Image (tube, rainbow, N blue to C red):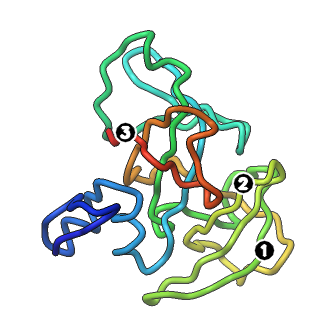
Amino acid sequence: IYFLETGSFKQVGTWNDLYERPLTPGAAQIVSYLDPVVLRGRLHAAGADWDIVSDELGKSIRLQGHVLRQGPYLDGVPVELYYRPEQIVASNSGPDETGFRVTGTSAKAGLEFVHVEHERGWRGTARWDGRSKPEGGQTVSVSFEDARQLLLCLCSGQDSTDSTGVAESPAMV
């Protein structure tokens, strides 16, 4: 597959290559049966690791699988993290993550999904792993902890996004 974006080839490979290792947000979206979940925040050095501090969720999430060199030049840089919805887990049996409520449900490829909204305004989709069928308005637990981040984009700033919220020219890491 040759993935063309903004007039040039951005990635060449098999469908599986684009699905597992997309090089741009556009490639991540085109090969998904559900839109990737985007979480915005700022990088924060955490010892030898990096966290994303998300104002959208009011919490930090540890970066997994990305190799970033330590240095003060990256601390505080705005970023976008892309996840596959099937790797984010929502349930009614886990620890109570306050602020998430169900706004709808859907099913794709034999999996059940919930659409959730956080009290701070973040919206996303997660795989449902609860014991009972989710209901609209229900408060649920949502975990990013075991989700493998699909793509990390370093953004030049808050004004670098278009009306869809996707960075126009992010640097991929």
Query: Within the image, what quadrant is residue 103 found in?
Result: bottom right
Residue identifier under label 2:
122
Q: Residues within 10 Å of mark 1 (few under 14, many from 20)?
A: some
Q: Quadrant of the C terminus?
A: top left
Q: Position of residue 43 (x, y in %)?
A: 51, 27
Query: Within the image, what quadrant is residue 135 found in?
Result: bottom right
Kind of residue at disc 1: Thr
Measure the alpha-carbon separation of dots 3 and 1: 33 Å
Q: Quadrant of the N terminus?
A: bottom left
Q: Residues within 10 Å of mark 2 (few under 14, many from 20)?
A: some
Q: Position of residue 47 (x, y in %)?
A: 43, 14
Counting residues from the N terminus, which is met first, the one under dot 1 or under dot 2? 1
Residue identifier under label 1:
103
Of residue 143 and residue 94, the one placed in the foreground of this image is 143
**Nearer to us: label 1 or label 2:** 2
Measure the alpha-carbon separation of dots 1 and 2: 12 Å
Counting residues from the N terminus, which is met first, the one under dot 3 or under dot 1? 1
Task: Tell me if label 2 and label 3 are in contact, CB under 8 Å.
Answer: no
Task: Tell me if label 3 and label 1 are in contact, CB under 8 Å.
Answer: no
Query: Within the image, what quadrant is residue 170 found in?
Result: top left
Residue identifier under label 3:
171
Q: How many badges with numbers are in the image? A: 3
Q: Which mark is residue 172?
A: none
Q: Position of residue 172 (x, y in %)?
A: 34, 42
**Callout 3: SS:** strand
Residue under the image location 32 percent in, 26 percent down:
68
